[in-house]
Image (spheres, grey):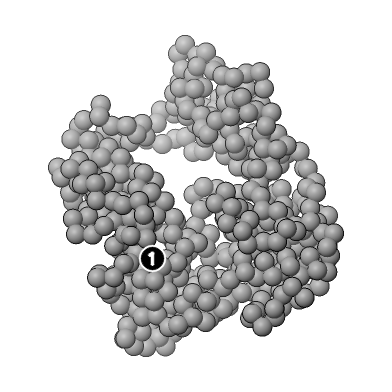
Amino acid sequence: MLVDEKQLTQEQEDIVSYDFQLGQVIRIVAFAGTGKTYTLVHLANRLAEDHPEWKILYLAFNKSIQVEAQGKFSQNVEPRTTHSIAFAAYGKDYRHKLGYDIKVRDVCDALKLKKPNYTLLKYAIETLKNYLNSTQTFIQNQHCPGIESPHHHYVNKIDVVDTAKKIWLMMQDKEDKSMPMLHDGYLKLFQLSKTSLPYDVVFFDECQDSNPVTTDIVRGQKHALRVMVGDPHQQIYGFRGAVDAFKNMPASKTFYLTGSFRFGDHFALLANVLLNEYKGERKKLNGLGESGLLGEVDEDLPYAVLTRTNAGIFDEAAQLHQNKKLGFLGGIKNYRFGMVQDVFYLSKGKKTQMNFAYLKKFDDLEDLEDFADETEDMELGGLVKTVKKYGDDIPSLIQSIQKNTISRLAKADVLLATTHKAKGFEFRHVKLKDDFADFFDERNKRRMPDMMPRDEINLYYVAVTRAKKRLQINRKLKRIISYLDKKYNLNYQALFN
């Protein structure tokens, strides 16, 4: 055999040795750090030995994961993204008019409107994007977002949907260069084609964060063995329209990977408490690595700071940049410090100096703050708090932070990342910023899972499972652990020794 069975845990061996059949749907629920890719590599080797004629598709979440997979799997596996498959079938025909986005001004020019209703066009674009991310065949009223916001003039839903249909027709017209074809557009065309892919096996990785279009494409490969792999508790892209494919594709067999090689029992216990208390998870994550410590990070050693919001990143950078070499996971440009500066300009009544059209819609800082509170928008709320905290220092702070940022992350004293960007990574020492959601009602001493978006709970789980050696949890999480101490027999104080 190509697989050395001694390298596998019993859970991994159960997967690799299973008698798989074409046409089956198999679930592998892989908790944080449990070696899902390692397991898939061994499974691919086993299938190559037993069924050398089978072709395997590894469906990657994004391009970087695809490139990484190419160096891990053997020749019987072809790592691809759904967009690359769809491009070969449909996207290449629109090579001359591809675009990453469409703006209101683009639609105005394409439709040759003399007196455009900008609000209607904005919602028509959103309606089209919602359709492109759905499994439906036609654009329908359900794809139209709520349009009775106090920050927009009222527009008619029928007109919005009709305009979205016009844009979609123009997008599909190969001769019409006035309307770009979006990458999600040709992916939608591929999904609608119901194409049967020339593979016998599909490894559907990170399927908890897949969009409905990709899930529908995999669901349609009924001739193939479909192996869905992921962790439903790491679904943190609901705001992008992600759906948990585990719930939408019934499986004939479900496996679990619960042994984490990343950390030991302390961090596993913390994750288990969160999942059990707030999500009703009965399976337990087991720490197979060295036991880490809960407590303050040693600031003389390199460490990572994980935040909930981009505003939290700015706040941490503002406090550290004079004494620490900072690195930003994914690059500093991805943290949109320009939005902090725009909210600063909004507070000064200098809208002409603002760059983000969305932020210009608000009358002043108080208007933005009221909107953030009403909609419970943590990102906008964080921006308001940042501007109130740093005030006139913001422009100079941004320049100083940029000056003291290094591109080589391995050389950074402090690595800064939102938890969204940190997913899939691990760090020796981790500090959690206190800008995460607060889902513990201290006054009434009760939990409030029905009031908390599932993504927010998942973000805590992702954050606490990034650390290998030391984890400095934030004030909100400490309060939750203290409250649940007796219920789960945590021995709260001992955890921090």
Q: Picture coordinates of residue 213 (x, y %)?
A: 65, 45
- Indicate the quadrant where residue 83 lies: top right
Q: Picture coordinates of residue 412 (x, y %)?
A: 31, 59
Label 1 sits on what residue type?
A: Phe
Q: Residue at position x 41%, y 28% from top?
A: 153
Q: Which of 436 and 297 is in front in this view?
A: 297
Q: Is residue 113 visible?
A: yes
Question: Is the C terminus in the top left, top right, bottom left or bottom right quadrant?
Answer: bottom left
Q: Residue at position x 14%, y 42% from top?
A: 392
Which residue ends up furthest to the left in the rendered image?
392
Q: Mark 1 points at which residue?
A: 439
Q: Residue at position x 67%, y 61% from top?
A: 73
Q: Is residue 460 visible?
A: no
Q: Is residue 476 left or right of residue 84?
A: left
Which residue ends up furthest to the top in the rendered image?
114
Q: Picture coordinates of residue 265 (x, y %)?
A: 46, 83
Mark 1: few/some/many CA within 10 Å (<14, 14-19, 20+): many
- Indicate the quadrant where residue 26 lies: bottom right
- Establish if 55 lies above or below 486: above
Q: Picture coordinates of residue 493 (x, y %)?
A: 31, 86
Q: Residue at position x 64%, y 48% from top?
A: 81
Disc 1 secondary structure class: loop
> How many numbered badges does the structure rendering display?
1
